[in-house]
């Protein structure tokens, strides 16, 4: 499907891919920012920060995984959820919050000790804050008091000098931190109160860059484009065997080297080595490897086994080279993946597209297999 | 190269005789001493012996205080310089010695430009990541010359300077009667619109003569004059600065299974980086790194990109987070060679700054709260 309609679909596909990518990255930013902030105000011996907390479940079985949890003192913890999109219906919003308000102090236990006090912190994108306030005000039965819910709206400020995330309270009374167990100089509640002139919490990017680089993912499934970039940049080179790495260094680095990998084992490696204490599940990895199959840098061998074609990717867009997406200012790995993925999504017939993610059950030799047999001319 | 001077090849058994031989060789031949000072994490002899970059062959003669290499590079091409099989061969002798109290070594040849650039430099650059080259900022080049000026009798004059701008404009400037610091005082250099890439200088008003050249990449030339100035003053200073810079990039790789990470920062004067278009400029500079790819996670208002160096698999995250700082978070397996390459690229293609160890990010709680 070429022509204007194909171009429009391609453009929309790429834009949607990057909208998801940016939204996910924003949550990673916020988790990294709060990890640094809370570590600086907490009692060091009791501080614990969980990037991948378990879901909280209500009596009726509804569940939601908070974005992060933290233990600040032996008596006080926080459960936090980032809200970027708001349900238009107040009841839907309430249902979404229900598992969080069902939090038990045991959900934030650290070192076997449950804190006496747990606050639920809602971190709401500023463009949704007003609508969220209306929804929250419509809950008349005290759902925000038990446990204590603190809505904070966030925005990115000081964009030209020292960009930082700003978190502000969304009410003048109530809805404040119950952080009396923190040392006086480190308490949030007096500063964000009217007596404290409603100070905001401001966390510079330079405060948390290291946490972001090492935290990588947040507590929900990443867009496949996001995880694909992470794995390509940080994980795949390590999967080459020694002779492939030597070959890579000594010869032409533009060549393609292949290796096979099981989604389960890759998920385990991610959680053990690359994103310590991570909660990457094999379904996320499967989805991402399927994505790379559509990009045509991987081949699906069985339902869980893939052959990766690792190489120094460079621009070779075929169909929509004139379409300007993402500002058109640069073409990075994410743009290459998104471009190739969308090109196949738009161009291929459904059957051909599906074939890319169907197991081939190929049993062909790979570069990482038998090195004992000489190739022609080699002795 | 024929050993036709007083110091015959067989006499060369110590650094002092080697340096004296070099002094005579440059007087008798048209070529200067051309050298590259580099960093090695293990004794280079072992690296030379066990690694041969494609197209190179090397014979090693260990002379105790230095190594004598017979180096040949085979280059494929066409034209009158190439034989009927389509090859030409660049061959010559290279001397490698260790610089005291540093992990820097100097490889030099008395040779023409082609052998040095195409054979010596390419050979060193083609070795595994345990051998790496480094770079000096404009400030560091000036520091080196300041120290030299303080240490010797007479005055240093610049005869030629090469400056480059981040967008790749190169200017060659000639001087008749200017002290060396005048190159650094040029408006485009002092305003950081250009950096100094090379400086050619000579000693005047002194009982000694000396003429030579220094480059930001650690290459240097000894053209004429007193050998001690070159071998005992300039090269040790160069080695110390390069080694110190190289230390910043050493052991910075993250360990698998932990989130512990060190950072490297490039710092600038407050307000030196103005406007969000600087994010794109930094991305473009990083895209200019050969044999690498980048992934941009955030481009506005701050910049976060991940780099994969296809030369050795090094990965690093780069952030531009304020008007005065670029920070680099090395990934697993990040090599000194690659981190140096990334930093050098940012200094050349974006803006020269001071490269330092990353600072602790912890702050006093007060600093997070802003009234109003």
Image (spheres, coloured by chain):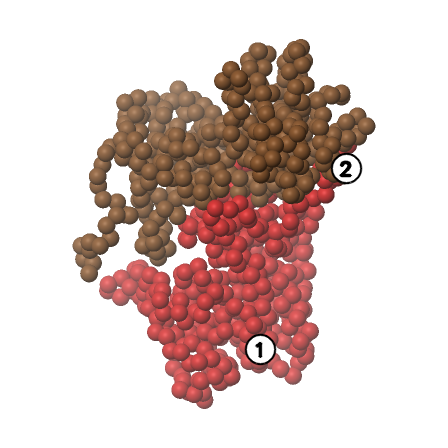
Chain colours: A brown, B red
Task: Indicate the position of residue B17 as horizontal and vertical percent values.
Answer: 49, 85
Quarter of the image holding residue A97?
top right
Q: Is residue A6 above or below residue B358?
A: above
Residue B290 lies, in percent from the top left, at 44, 50
Q: Which of B243 and A171 lies nearest the eye of the viewer?
A: A171
Q: Is residue A54 visible?
A: yes
Mark 1 → mark 2, Cα distance in angstroms:
60 Å
Vertical side of B38 occupied by B16: above or below = below
Query: Which chain letter matches label 1?
Result: B
On residue A184, the disc is: 2
Question: Answer yes or no: do the residues labelled 1 and 2 have beta carbons within 8 Å?
Answer: no
Q: Residues within 10 Å of mark 2 (few under 14, many from 20)?
A: few
Which residue occupies 36% across, 34% down?
A289
Question: Depth check: B119 or B129 in front?
Answer: B129
Quadrant of the rendered image containing residue B321:
top right
Q: Nearer the viewer, residue A315 or B336?
A: B336
Check disc 2 and report its element: helix, strand or loop.
Answer: helix
Residue that mark 1 sits on: B232
């Amino acid at each position: 499907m070429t022509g204007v309609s194909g171009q429009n679909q391609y453009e929309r596909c790429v834009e949607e891919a990057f909208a998801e990518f940016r939204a996910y990255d924003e949550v990673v930013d916020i988790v990294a920012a709060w990890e640094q902030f809370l570590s600086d105000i907490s009692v060091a011996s009791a501080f614990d920060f969980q990037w991948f907390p378990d879901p909280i479940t209500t009596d009726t079985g509804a569940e939601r995984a908070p974005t992060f949890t933290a233990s600040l003192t032996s008596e006080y913890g926080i459960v936090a959820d980032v809200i970027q999109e708001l349900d238009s219906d107040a009841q839907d919003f309430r249902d979404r919050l229900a598992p969080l308000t069902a939090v038990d102090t045991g959900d934030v236990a650290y070192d076997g000790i449950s804190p006496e006090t747990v606050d639920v912190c809602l971190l709401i994108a500023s463009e949704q804050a007003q609508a969220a306030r209306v929804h929250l005000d419509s809950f008349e039965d005290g759902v925000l008091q038990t446990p204590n819910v603190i809505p904070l709206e966030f925005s990115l400020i000081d964009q030209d000098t020292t960009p930082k995330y700003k978190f502000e309270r969304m009410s003048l009374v109530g809805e404040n931190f119950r952080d009396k167990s923190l040392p006086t100089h480190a308490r949030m509640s007096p500063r964000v109160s009217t007596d404290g002139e409603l100070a905001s919490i401001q966390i510079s990017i330079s405060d948390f860059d290291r946490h972001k680089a090492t935290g990588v993912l947040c507590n929900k499934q990443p867009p496949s484009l996001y995880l694909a970039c992470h794995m390509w940049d940080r994980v795949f080179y390590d999967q080459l065997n020694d002779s492939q790495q030597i070959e890579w260094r000594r010869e032409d680095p533009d060549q393609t080297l292949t290796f096979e990998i099981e989604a389960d084992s890759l998920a385990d490696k991610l959680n053990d080595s690359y994103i310590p204490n991570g909660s990457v599940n094999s379904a996320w990895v499967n989805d991402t490897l399927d994505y790379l199959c559509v990009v045509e840098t991987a081949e699906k061998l069985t339902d869980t086994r893939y052959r990766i074609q690792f190489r120094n990717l460079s621009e070779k867009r075929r169909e929509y080279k004139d379409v300007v997406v993402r500002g058109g200012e640069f073409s990075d790995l994410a743009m290459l993946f998104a471009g190739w993925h969308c090109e196949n999504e738009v161009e291929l017939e459904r059957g051909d597209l599906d074939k890319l993610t169907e197991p081939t059950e190929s049993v062909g030799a790979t570069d990482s297999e038998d090195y004992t047999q000489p190739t022609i001319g080699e002795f | 190269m024929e050993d036709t001077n007083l110091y015959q090849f067989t006499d060369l058994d110590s650094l002092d005789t080697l340096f004296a031989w070099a002094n005579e060789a440059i007087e008798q031949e048209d070529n200067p001493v051309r050298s590259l000072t580099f960093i090695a994490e293990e004794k280079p002899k072992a690296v030379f012996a066990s690694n041969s970059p494609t197209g190179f062959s090397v014979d090693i003669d260990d002379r105790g205080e230095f190594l004598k290499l017979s180096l040949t590079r085979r280059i494929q091409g066409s034209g009158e310089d190439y034989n009927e099989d389509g090859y030409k061969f660049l061959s010559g002798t290279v001397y490698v010695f260790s610089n005291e109290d540093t992990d820097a070594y100097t490889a030099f040849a008395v040779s023409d430009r082609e052998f040095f650039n195409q054979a010596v430099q390419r050979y060193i650059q083609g070795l595994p990541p345990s051998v790496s080259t480094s770079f000096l900022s404009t400030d560091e080049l000036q520091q080196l010359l300041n120290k030299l000026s303080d240490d010797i009798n007479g005055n240093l004059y610049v005869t030629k300077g090469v400056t480059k701008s981040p967008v790749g404009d190169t200017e060659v400037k000639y001087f008749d009667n200017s002290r060396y610091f005048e190159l650094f005082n040029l408006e485009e250099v002092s305003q950081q619109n250009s950096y100094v890439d090379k400086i050619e200088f000579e000693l005047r008003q002194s009982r000694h003569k000396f003429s030579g050249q220094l480059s930001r990449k650690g290459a240097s030339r000894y053209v004429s004059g007193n050998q001690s100035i070159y071998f005992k003053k300039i090269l040790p200073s160069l080695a110390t600065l390069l080694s110190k810079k190289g230390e910043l990039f050493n052991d910075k790789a993250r360990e698998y299974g932990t989130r512990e990470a060190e950072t490297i920062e490039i710092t600038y004067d407050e307000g030196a980086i103005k406007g969000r278009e600087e994010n794109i400029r930094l991305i473009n500079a990083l895209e200019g790194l050969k044999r690498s790819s980048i992934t941009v996670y955030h481009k506005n208002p701050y910049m976060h990109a991940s780099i994969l160096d296809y030369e050795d698999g090094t990965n690093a995250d780069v952030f531009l987070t304020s008007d005065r700082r670029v920070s680099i978070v090395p990934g697993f397996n990040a090599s000194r060679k690659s981190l140096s390459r990334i930093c050098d690229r940012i200094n050349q293609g974006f803006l020269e700054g001071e490269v330092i160890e990353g600072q602790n990010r912890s702050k006093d709680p007060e600093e997070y709260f802003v009234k109003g």
